[in-house]
Image (cartoon, rainbow, N blue to C red):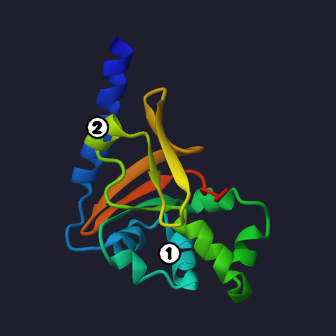
Amino acid sequence: MFQKIAAKTALAALILGAATASADAGKDVLAVAKQKGNFSTLTKAIEAAGLQDALSQGTVTVFAPTDEAFAKLPPGQLEALLRPENKDQLVKILTNHVVPGKALETDDLKRTRSAKTVGGEEVKFELVRGRVRVDNARVTGDYKASNGAVVAVDTVLMPN
């Protein structure tokens, strides 16, 4: 019983506390990601894929791989994805990180344990040892934006 309460408290603190503490009310998700500094690879990939405008429309949750997450990719894979001839594959990977709406609100986690991405894939949410995970990635931060949230993850979420 205590573990369940502790896990829920940790989840609420991560989702609500971190988002409130780092709110950037006037900035959209892309601007927030750029400002934070540890998403430079992601923002470069978003620009290479031409997805800037799509991320400024409507409310979205971006499961944002950190620069360290991109560094875990096999050597040469990121460089290959950023080439113009691989734009379709890059778009597929990036849209696998975007969920319409606010995907990690505390109330939503009580009702659902997954969400459909803009790319058509399903991502699953779970608590593991008091930490939120999205598929195989650990959530390491949550930053509120004017049109949603940037949720830092430690792994690139590859589509099936």
Q: Quadrant of residue 15?
A: top left
For disc 1, the marked residue is 43
The structure residue drawn at horizontal position 55% and vertical position 62%, both measured from the top left corner, is: 96
The structure residue drawn at horizontal position 67% and vertical position 61%, both measured from the top left corner, is: 71
Is 151 above or below relative to 81? above
Q: Circle 1: is it few (<14), some (14-19), or many (20+) Cα within 10 Å?
A: many
Choose the circle earlier in sequence order: 1 or 2: 2
Is 38 above or below relative to 51? above
At label 1, which amino acid type do we have? Thr
**What is the secondary structure assignment of the residue under circle 1?**
helix
Which of the numbered marks, if any, corresponds to residue 12? none
Task: Tell me the quadrant of the picture where the C terminus can be found.
Answer: bottom right
Left or right, residue 86 beside residue 103: right
At label 2, which amino acid type do we have? Ala
Task: Tell me the quadrant of the picture where the N terminus can be found.
Answer: top left
Q: Residue 149: image x %, image y %?
A: 33, 60
Q: Quadrant of residue 53?
A: bottom left
Which of the numbered marks, if any, corresponds to residue 13? 2
Q: Circle 2: is it few (<14), some (14-19), or many (20+) Cα within 10 Å?
A: some
Which residue is outermost to the top?
A: 1
